[in-house]
C-alpha cells in the first residue's frame, strides 16, 4: 500500500510539472504603471520591481525556476544579464514585454553596469526573450543581445537596433552568439548596428566551444555599417560553427555581405531574399558568401536553395574558393559581378553543384565557373546587355550558350532566354516580383530529378524560386473554434459580431476589411472571427509557402473578407501542401496529410478528424466525431500554460472588447474564460 501511495505521489508531481502549477509570474515596472515599484516588493502587477536587478539577484539565489514568467512594462531600463540558469524544454523561463507595451533595454542607461550588452544570456538554457527593444550597446565582439555558452533559447519578436558608438568601429552586432547552440532566432527586426545584424561564432581551435544547429528564421535585417568589410546582415565565423538553418530572412542594405558563412560549414540556407549589399561603396558586397573553413580549403557543404539575390555590389552567390555545396532553384539578378562566382578555387578537389538556377543580367556573367563546377546543368542564363558575358568559364568569357556548351558539355540542358519575371522595374527594390509570367521558358524545364525537393506541377520543376501556377486557387476549408462552439446546435456562436466587437479591419495586418453587408448576415453564415491561414510545404512543414487571412462562419466555413467567397490565392503553388489555421487564442491546427488540388480547389474539413500532432496535441473532440481547435492560448506560443493565465489576469473583468484573453469569444473576459483555460492547461502544439 505504501508503494501505491508513492506511485500516486510521483504521478501527481509529474502532473504538476506538466501543467505548470508551480509557475510564478513577476512584473518589472520602472514607471510604476501598475503600482509603486520597489526592489523589496513581491513583484506582483500592483507591487512590481523597478528593474531587472531584482530578477538577476533572484536568479543568483535560485528563486527563478522553469516556467516562471517575467513581464517588463513600458519604460527605459538598464542592461541586465541572466547567468547560469535553465528552464526546460516544456517550461522555458520567459522574459517578455507586457502585452501591448514595449520596454526599452538601453545599455547607456545611467544604471547600466556595462555598455557591452543590453541583454545577455550567459551559460543559460531554455530562456525566451520576447518583445523587447534593445539599443545602445557597444564594445569589442559583443551584441546588443549576447548569447554566451547558451543553448535551446528562443529569441523572438524583438526590435534590436543602434547598438554602436556613433561612427566608431566598435565590433558590435545586433545579436551575437558565441559557443552557443540549438537556439532559435525568429521574427526579429534588426537594423543599424555597427557590425553584423546577427553574428554567430565559435573557437577555431577548441572543439568544445562550438556553435551548431541554431535556427535563424523570418528576421528582417538591414542597414548595418561602420566596419568596412565586417558589417554583414548575418555572419558566421569559426571552424566549429556548423549545421545551422538560415531560412525566410529578408536581408538588405548592409555595408558588407548579406549572408556570410565564411569559415563555417554545413548550413541549410533556403528561401532568403537578399539585395543591395555593399552599395555604400565599401565592403565586399556579395549577396551570399558561401565559404568553407580555413578560407575555402575545407569544403563548405552548404545546401542553398530557393533564395533570391539581386542588386548587390559584387556577386550574387560567392563560393569563396570552397567546394562541396549545392545551389538549387536560386535567382541571381542585376549583381555588379557574377551571379554565381565559382571560378577561383582554394579547394580544387570537391565540386559544387548548380542546378535550376536563373541567372540574369549579372555584369560579370550569369556564373563564373571552372572545371571544378562539373556538376552544373539545367540553369537559365540571360543578358539583356549583349556586351556582358553570358558565362565565364576558366576565366574566359562566353557570349552565347552554344560556345559555352562546346567547352563545357555538362550544361547540355541549360537555356539562354529571358525568364520573364513578373516585375523587375519597380521604383523600389523591395517591390520586385520574381514570379514567372505565363510562357516563361523556365516553366517545366528544370532538372526532372527535382534536386531542390519541393513539390512542383507539370512535367518537371520550374527553374528559379517560384513554381508557376496558371490559375487562381481556392480554399474550401471548414473548422470549429472550441471557444465559440455550441454542442447543442453544432454551430459556433457569433457573440463577437452581435456585440459589435468583431473588428471590420483585419487584425492580422493583411490588407482587407469586412463590408457592412457581411457583418449584417445572420444565421449559419454569420461571421464568427478572423483567422490566419498558411500553406505549408510537404517536405518541410516549417516552410510557409503562402500566408493569407480569412473569416470563419458559424457553420465552420472559411470565407474571404467579403464574408461570402471562398478564400482565393493568386500565387504559384505546388499541387500538394498542408493547410495551417491559427486563431488569436486557440492552439493552431494543421492537416495531418498533404492536401492535393482538385482543379483549382483545395478542400479540407478539420471538423471530421483529428489533425497533425507530432509529440503534442492536434484538435479536441468537441462532441462525438466533431473536432475543433483548443482554446486558452492567448500568448500565441502554441502552449497553454501559466503565461496564458497571467495574461488573462491582466484583462479579467473587462467587457465589450475584442481581446485575446476572451477564450469563450463572448466579448467579455471573466471566470468563464478561466474555466476553459483550466480545462486545457498543460496542452501544447508542436507544429513546426
Image: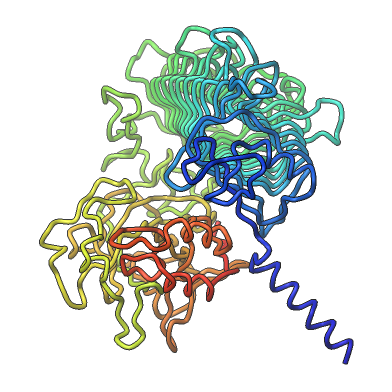
| Residue 23 in which image quadrant | bottom right
Q: Quadrant of the C terminus?
A: bottom right
Residue drawn at (58%, 9%), measured in percent from left and top? 228
Q: Quadrant of the N terminus?
A: bottom right
Q: Is residue 615 above or below residue 236?
A: below
Q: Residue at the far left: name it.
A: 517
In this view, the residue in front, 266 or 564, is 564
Q: Is residue 299 left or right of residue 168?
A: right
Q: Where residue 261 sits: x, y (%)?
A: 64, 28
Q: Is residue 129 left or right of residue 212?
A: left
| Residue 143 in which image quadrant | top right
Q: Is residue 651 above or below residue 15?
A: above
Q: Where residue 454 sits: x, y (%)?
A: 49, 51
Q: Where residue 526 sits: x, y (%)?
A: 20, 71
Count of residue discs: 0
Q: Is residue 316 above or below residue 474?
A: above
Amino acid at each position: 500500500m505504501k508503494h501505491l501511495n508513492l506511485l500516486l505521489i510521483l504521478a501527481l508531481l509529474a502532473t504538476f510539472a506538466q501543467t505548470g502549477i508551480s509557475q510564478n509570474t513577476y512584473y518589472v515596472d520602472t514607471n510604476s504603471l501598475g503600482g509603486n515599484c520597489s526592489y523589496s516588493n513581491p513583484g506582483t502587477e500592483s507591487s512590481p520591481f523597478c528593474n531587472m536587478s531584482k530578477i538577476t539577484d533572484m536568479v543568483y539565489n535560485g528563486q527563478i525556476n522553469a516556467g516562471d514568467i517575467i513581464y517588463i512594462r513600458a519604460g527605459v531600463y538598464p542592461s541586465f544579464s541572466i547567468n547560469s540558469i535553465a528552464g526546460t524544454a516544456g517550461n522555458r523561463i520567459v522574459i517578455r514585454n507586457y502585452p501591448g507595451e514595449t520596454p526599452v533595454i538601453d545599455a547607456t542607461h545611467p544604471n547600466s553596469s556595462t555598455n557591452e550588452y543590453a541583454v545577455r544570456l550567459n551559460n543559460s538554457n531554455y530562456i525566451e526573450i520576447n518583445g523587447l527593444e534593445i539599443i545602445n550597446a557597444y564594445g569589442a565582439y559583443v551584441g546588443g543581445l549576447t548569447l554566451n555558452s547558451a543553448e535551446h533559447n528562443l529569441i523572438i519578436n524583438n526590435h534590436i537596433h543602434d547598438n554602436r558608438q556613433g561612427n566608431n568601429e566598435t565590433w558590435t552586432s545586433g545579436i551575437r552568439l558565441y559557443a552557443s547552440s540549438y537556439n532559435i532566432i525568429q521574427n526579429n527586426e534588426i537594423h543599424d548596428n555597427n557590425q553584423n545584424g546577427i553574428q554567430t561564432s565559435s573557437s577555431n581551435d577548441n572543439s568544445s566551444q562550438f556553435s551548431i544547429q541554431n535556427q535563424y528564421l523570418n528576421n528582417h535585417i538591414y542597414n548595418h555599417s561602420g566596419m568596412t568589410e565586417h558589417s554583414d546582415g548575418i555572419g558566421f565565423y569559426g571552424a566549429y560553427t556548423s549545421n545551422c538553418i538560415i531560412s525566410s530572412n529578408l536581408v538588405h542594405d548592409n555595408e558588407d555581405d548579406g549572408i556570410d558563412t565564411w569559415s563555417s560549414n554545413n548550413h541549410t540556407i533556403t528561401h532568403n531574399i537578399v539585395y543591395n549589399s555593399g552599395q555604400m561603396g565599401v565592403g565586399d558586397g556579395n549577396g551570399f558568401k558561401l565559404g568553407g573553413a580555413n578560407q575555402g580549403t575545407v569544403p563548405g557543404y552548404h545546401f542553398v536553395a530557393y533564395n533570391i539575390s539581386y542588386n548587390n555590389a559584387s556577386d550574387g552567390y560567392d563560393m569563396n574558393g570552397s567546394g562541396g555545396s549545392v545551389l538549387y532553384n536560386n535567382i541571381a539578378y542585376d549583381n555588379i559581378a557574377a551571379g554565381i562566382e565559382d571560378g577561383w578555387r582554394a579547394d580544387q578537389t570537391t565540386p559544387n553543384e548548380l542546378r535550376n538556377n536563373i541567372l540574369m543580367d549579372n555584369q560579370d556573367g550569369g556564373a563564373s565557373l571552372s572545371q571544378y563546377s562539373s556538376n552544373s546543368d539545367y540553369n537559365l542564363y540571360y543578358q539583356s546587355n549583349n556586351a556582358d558575358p553570358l558565362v565565364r568559364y576558366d576565366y574566359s568569357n562566353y557570349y552565347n550558350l552554344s560556345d559555352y556548351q562546346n567547352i563545357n558539355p555538362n550544361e547540355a540542358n541549360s537555356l539562354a532566354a529571358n525568364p520573364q519575371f513578373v516585375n523587375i522595374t519597380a521604383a523600389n527594390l523591395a517591390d520586385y516580383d520574381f514570379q514567372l509570367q505565363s510562357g516563361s521558358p523556365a516553366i517545366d524545364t528544370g532538372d526532372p530529378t527535382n534536386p531542390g525537393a519541393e513539390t512542383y506541377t507539370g512535367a518537371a520543376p520550374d527553374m528559379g524560386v517560384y513554381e508557376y501556377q496558371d490559375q487562381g486557387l481556392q480554399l474550401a476549408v471548414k473548422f470549429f473554434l472550441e471557444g465559440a462552439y455550441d454542442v447543442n446546435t453544432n454551430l459556433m456562436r457569433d457573440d463577437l459580431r452581435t456585440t459589435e466587437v468583431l473588428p471590420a479591419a483585419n487584425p492580422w495586418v493583411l490588407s482587407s476589411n469586412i463590408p457592412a453587408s457581411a457583418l449584417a448576415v445572420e444565421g449559419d453564415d454569420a461571421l464568427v472571427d478572423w483567422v490566419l491561414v498558411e500553406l505549408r510545404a510537404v517536405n518541410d512543414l516549417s516552410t510557409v509557402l503562402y500566408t493569407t487571412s480569412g473569416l470563419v462562419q458559424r457553420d465552420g466555413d472559411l470565407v474571404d473578407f467579403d464574408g461570402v467567397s471562398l478564400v482565393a490565392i493568386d500565387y504559384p503553388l505546388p499541387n500538394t501542401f498542408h493547410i495551417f489555421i491559427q486563431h488569436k487564442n486557440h492552439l493552431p491546427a494543421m492537416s495531418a496529410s498533404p492536401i492535393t488540388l482538385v482543379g483549382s480547389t483545395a478542400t479540407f474539413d478539420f471538423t471530421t478528424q483529428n489533425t497533425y500532432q507530432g509529440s503534442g496535441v492536434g484538435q479536441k473532440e468537441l462532441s462525438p466525431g466533431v473536432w475543433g481547435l483548443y482554446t486558452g492560448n492567448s500568448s500565441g506560443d502554441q502552449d497553454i500554460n501559466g503565461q496564458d493565465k497571467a495574461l488573462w489576469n491582466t484583462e479579467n473583468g473587462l467587457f465589450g472588447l475584442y481581446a485575446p484573453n476572451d477564450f469563450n469569444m463572448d466579448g467579455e473576459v471573466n471566470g468563464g474564460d478561466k474555466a476553459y483555460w483550466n480545462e486545457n492547461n498543460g496542452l501544447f502544439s508542436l507544429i513546426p
